[in-house]
Amino acid sequence: MPFTLATWNINSVRLRESLVRDLLTQTGVDVLCLQECKSPVEKIPSFADLGYGHAVARGQKGYNGVAILSKLPLEEVGAHDHVALGHARHVAARLENGVTIHNYYVPAGGDVPDRAQNEKFGQKLDYLTAMRDDFRANRPERAILVGDLNIAPREDDVWSHKQLLKVVSHTPVEVAHLAETQEAGSWIDVTRADIPEGQLYSWWSYRSPDWDAADKGRRLDHVWATPDIANAAHSSRILRHVRGWEKPSDHAPVLATFDL
């Protein structure tokens, strides 16, 4: 049975509950994975009245936080606290068809791409290394990985490859770490498998006075799948217009449909 999945860094689920409701109503996605919920689990709004009666989450007050909302029955299968940061950055759930969904919020890494000068950048690299090691030790099967991975890996995933080479989220060391993580699980980038060519962004900075016209975006949000189910994925898209909603997140939702 086909199901459509979306991933979205919501930048406070309580502040933007109405936007989540609008997205769910307008798209009817079966599963929505949220990052940066910025809420304890018990205070994350319920969307059961819209048909999303199943949910798993990890939360923190005012910081981080991940949640999976679903129309389809699912069971929680754990969460990692990579590098023992004490952050709510991962939760996983399994659908009745045996597909496991991993929802990740990788550390942003601060502003300076140097672990000697910036502890947060070191934490980001170490987090990715821990993800890599986990996938090597526990080879994923029938799995989907989504989330704000905070790295735009390809040259056409950013508005200017040359100008962003020394900017956190597109530096060569981050791209290399993400590539190792992806390779460790044999993950396939579903979005780029569907849309192989051209500029593609899912994030536009709040700092830009006219984000749409300037279009200085980056593709930080990803949908990956293991090889045994990747061929079932199709209809990938990024809902750019959502970035233009009133009081929006700086991220746009990324969607894909799986015939499983």
Image (cartoon, rainbow, N blue to C red):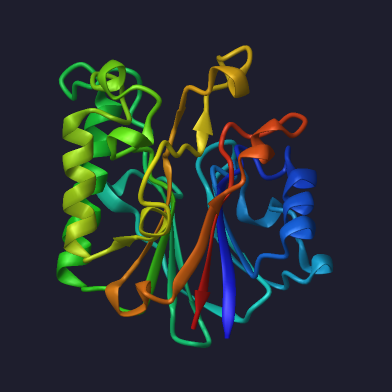
Residue 207 versus residue 156 in the image, above or below: above
Q: Residue at x 49, y 83 (%)?
A: 260
Instruction: Say whether residue 130 is left or right of residue 210.
Output: left
What percent of the width, then of the height, locates residue 111?
34, 18
Outermost residue, right side: 49
* Quadrant of the drawing holding the N terminus: bottom right
Outermost residue, top side: 209
What percent of the width, then of the height, locates residue 86?
38, 46
Quarter-of-image position of residue 154: top left
Residue 206 versus residue 177 in the image, above or below: above
What percent of the width, then of the height, locates residue 234?
48, 67
Q: Residue at x 28, y 33 (%)?
A: 155
Number of labelled discs?
0
Q: Residue at x 16, y 33 (%)?
A: 173
Instruction: Say whether residue 39 is left or right of residue 201.
Output: right
Viewer-side residue, 181 vs 137: 181
Viewer-side residue, 188 vs 235: 235
What percent of the width, then of the height, locates residue 51?
78, 71
Viewer-side residue, 206 vs 228: 228
Viewer-side residue, 219 vs 92: 219
Q: Residue at x 73, y 52 (%)?
A: 23
Quarter-of-image position of residue 246: top right
Instruction: Say whether residue 137 is left or right of residue 235.
Output: left
Residue 155 versus residue 194 in the image, above or below: above
